[in-house]
Image (cartoon, coloured by chain):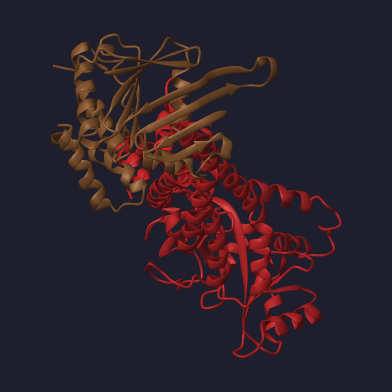
Chain colours: A red, B brown
């Protein structure tokens, strides 16, 4: 038996391919939206994995350090290190800020860490790890910095000695890693005018500048310019020790909040990315409805353009299921062309997006199934119209 | 008459009560295999209704129809003898329309081969049958062409080949020469006569084309739903 749908597609392939391409671009946009969501989730997972931590210790009653502000004393790690089952513990700071790069500002997340401890970027693309205690930095390639370039953070310049990749915050900002002490200073360092003004205000306070207590004013000034806070302590547990067990100990004895990897993933993916996921979900739903409407409209108008031929086909004995099959196959063909164009488009333009777009094969398979189902449903309108055609219309009168 | 087509007391009423219209009233016709008859009448006389009844597209109100010696409709015995009118049309009735109405996305061969394929015949024999008919109608050289690449006359010849594809005992031709000039109209009629004779098919040609009316040996005049048979001039075609 001849494939009526195939012949019709071949006969008007130009119209079909152009329509399929238009639909494909829409499907490409849909796949990209799904890829953006997957990218956000993957970024969050990579962020947690690359920190090398099993437990995140943060300020009590907060969900820090990524989802919420958290501030704890920078000696908190010592108490944590003393707990049984803890192999390593180190302080880290996270500060989202604009850093100068030539004539423009780069929005980055500046991470303060201690070399050789949890929080250090695991893999370098180029360069070396931090060897000096100050003014060296490792930057994510997405920042655009190159080895040897200088990054200006607050009042200090840092030399880029290493480059890493896939190290971005949950907001998609690429990371710059600097020594912990420098990061602590950068987080709270005021500009010179503010420091002079603050010192003058302290000196004019008789309670803090008593004539009979030498050294009090200097001590207060020193306390005001030194920062002893960090955002979190990252903990690596000893082999064979369950992370939850250690986390419970920390919560119980240190009056701090401790999250295991699984709990932190839940905070990042379920809570932090949830709004974005809903937003993307809405877009996906709208794009799916628009795609369905387009397929329905195109197939319907194509069918209306063939009413006379359908009447003749019915008159000469073509079964309804053959005609319905022809329309259904055309709708599915259109969907298939759209999917192929969409997949290629999303693959080509995905890397150009500022945020990571992860196109998973599983999503592509799911999209193909959804497109086929949507196309099949969209063709019902046209099939209904075709089945209503009276074969008598082929005969004049 | 045992073969060809035979109609007895065929009536068709549209609507009911005061608004009822009798489109056909006790129509009687019989056409022998290989015979070409004309069905002539003014607009609204019932030609199309008769064609639709003969073509198993609409159900008559009363009467009896025999096709190839087999009763296909008898109002006294419950109406249609088969539930599958689609198969009846496909296998036993050929249609030729005012315009060729070829399927635009099938080539010439497949336009003709489609009917045997719809009837369940394999692709090879169906295409062979199509080739045979296209040769008989002198359009075999356009076998691979698309309908849009054919002239009007060629398209009409292909539509005749399609009507003959399943070797039906009857072909219903609805004003097949209407859009054609005299020369082409006569050519089409020559072909119909030749095919009727060659394939022993009864052909009913609905027409009010004055150019071709003198060709028929027998003509049915239809007026206000009633038919009258008269002998045509039967000049034939030179």
Percent across and percent down for residue A97 are 58, 52
The quarter of the rendered structure image containing the C terminus of chain A is top left
Please name the residue shown 42% across and 27% down the image: A394
**B102 left or right, relative to A266:** left
Q: Quadrant of residue B5?
A: top left
Percent across and percent down for residue A143 are 45, 54
Look at the picture and state if A325 lies above or below A159: above
Percent across and percent down for residue A128 are 40, 71
Q: Is residue B174 visible?
A: yes
Percent across and percent down for residue A292 are 54, 42
Q: Closest to the observer: A310 or A46?
A: A310
Q: Closest to the observer: B86 or A91?
A: B86
Q: Quadrant of residue A223?
A: bottom right
Please name the residue shown 59% across and 22% down the image: B14
Look at the picture and state if A367 lies above or below B237: below
Look at the picture and state if A291 lies above or below A368: above
**B178 left or right, relative to A384:** left
**A186 left or right, relative to B150:** right
**A178 left or right, relative to B2:** right
């Amino acid at each position: 038996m001849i494939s009526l749908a195939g012949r019709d597609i071949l006969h008007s392939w130009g119209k079909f391919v152009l329509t399929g391409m238009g639909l494909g671009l829409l499907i490409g946009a849909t796949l990209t939206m799904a890829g953006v969501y997957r990218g956000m989730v993957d970024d969050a997972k990579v962020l947690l994995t690359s920190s090398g931590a099993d437990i995140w210790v943060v300020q009590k009653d907060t969900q820090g350090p990524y989802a919420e502000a958290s501030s704890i004393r920078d000696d908190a790690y010592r108490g944590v290190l003393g707990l049984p089952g803890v192999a390593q513990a180190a302080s880290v700071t996270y500060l989202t800020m604009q850093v100068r790069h030539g004539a423009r500002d780069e929005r980055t997340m500046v991470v303060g860490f201690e070399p050789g401890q949890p929080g250090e970027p695991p893999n370098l693309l180029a360069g070396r790890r931090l060897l000096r205690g100050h003014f060296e930095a490792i930057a994510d390639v997405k920042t655009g910095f190159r080895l040897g370039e200088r990054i200006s953070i607050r009042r200090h310049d840092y030399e880029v000695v290493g480059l890493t990749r896939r190290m971005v915050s949950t907001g998609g900002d690429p990371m710059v890693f600097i020594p912990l002490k420098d990061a602590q200073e950068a987080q709270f360092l005021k500009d010179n005018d503010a420091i002079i003004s603050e010192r003058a205000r302290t000196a004019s306070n008789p309670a803090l500048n008593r004539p009979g207590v030498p050294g009090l004013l200097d001590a207060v000034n020193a306390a005001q310019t030194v920062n002893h806070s960090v955002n979190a302590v990252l903990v690596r547990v000893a082999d064979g020790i369950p992370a939850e067990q250690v986390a419970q100990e920390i919560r119980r004895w240190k009056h701090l909040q401790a999250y295991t990897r699984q709990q932190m993933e839940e905070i990042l993916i379920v809570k932090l990315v949830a709004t974005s996921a809903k937003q993307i979900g809405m877009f996906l739903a709208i794009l799916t409805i628009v795609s369905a409407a387009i397929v329905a409209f195109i197939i319907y108008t194509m069918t209306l353009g063939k009413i006379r031929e359908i009447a003749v086909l019915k008159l000469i004995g073509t079964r309804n299921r053959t005609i319905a099959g022809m329309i259904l196959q055309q709708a599915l063909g259109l969907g298939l062309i759209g999917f192929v164009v969409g997949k290629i488009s999303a693959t080509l333009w995905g890397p150009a997006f500022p945020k990571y777009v992860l196109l998973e094969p599983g999503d592509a398979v799911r999209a193909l199934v959804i497109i086929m189902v949507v196309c099949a449903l969209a063709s019902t309108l046209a099939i209904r119209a075709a089945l209503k055609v009276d074969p008598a219309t082929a005969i004049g009168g | 008459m045992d073969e060809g087509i035979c109609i007895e007391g065929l009536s068709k009423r549209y609507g009911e009560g005061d608004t009822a219209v009798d489109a056909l009233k006790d129509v009687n016709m019989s056409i022998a295999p290989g015979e070409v008859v004309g069905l002539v009448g003014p607009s609204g006389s019932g030609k199309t209704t008769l064609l639709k009844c003969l073509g198993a597209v609409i159900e008559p109100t009363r009467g009896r129809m025999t096709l190839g010696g087999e009763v296909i409709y008898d109002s006294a015995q419950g109406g249609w003898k088969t539930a599958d009118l689609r198969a009846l049309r496909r296998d036993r009735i050929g249609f030729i329309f005012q315009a060729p109405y070829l399927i635009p996305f099938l080539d010439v061969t497949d336009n003709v081969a489609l009917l045997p394929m719809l009837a369940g015949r394999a692709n090879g024999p169906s295409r062979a049958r199509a080739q045979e008919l296209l040769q008989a109608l002198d359009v075999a050289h356009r076998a691979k062409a698309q309908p849009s690449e054919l002239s009007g006359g060629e398209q009409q010849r292909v539509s005749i080949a399609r009507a003959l594809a399943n070797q039906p005992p009857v072909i219903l031709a609805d004003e097949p020469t209407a859009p054609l000039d005299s020369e082409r109209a006569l050519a089409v009629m020559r072909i119909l006569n030749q095919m009727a004779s060659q394939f022993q098919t009864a052909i009913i040609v609905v027409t009010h084309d004055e150019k071709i009316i003198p060709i028929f040996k027998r003509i049915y005049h239809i007026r206000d739903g009633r038919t009258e048979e008269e002998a045509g001039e039967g000049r034939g075609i030179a």
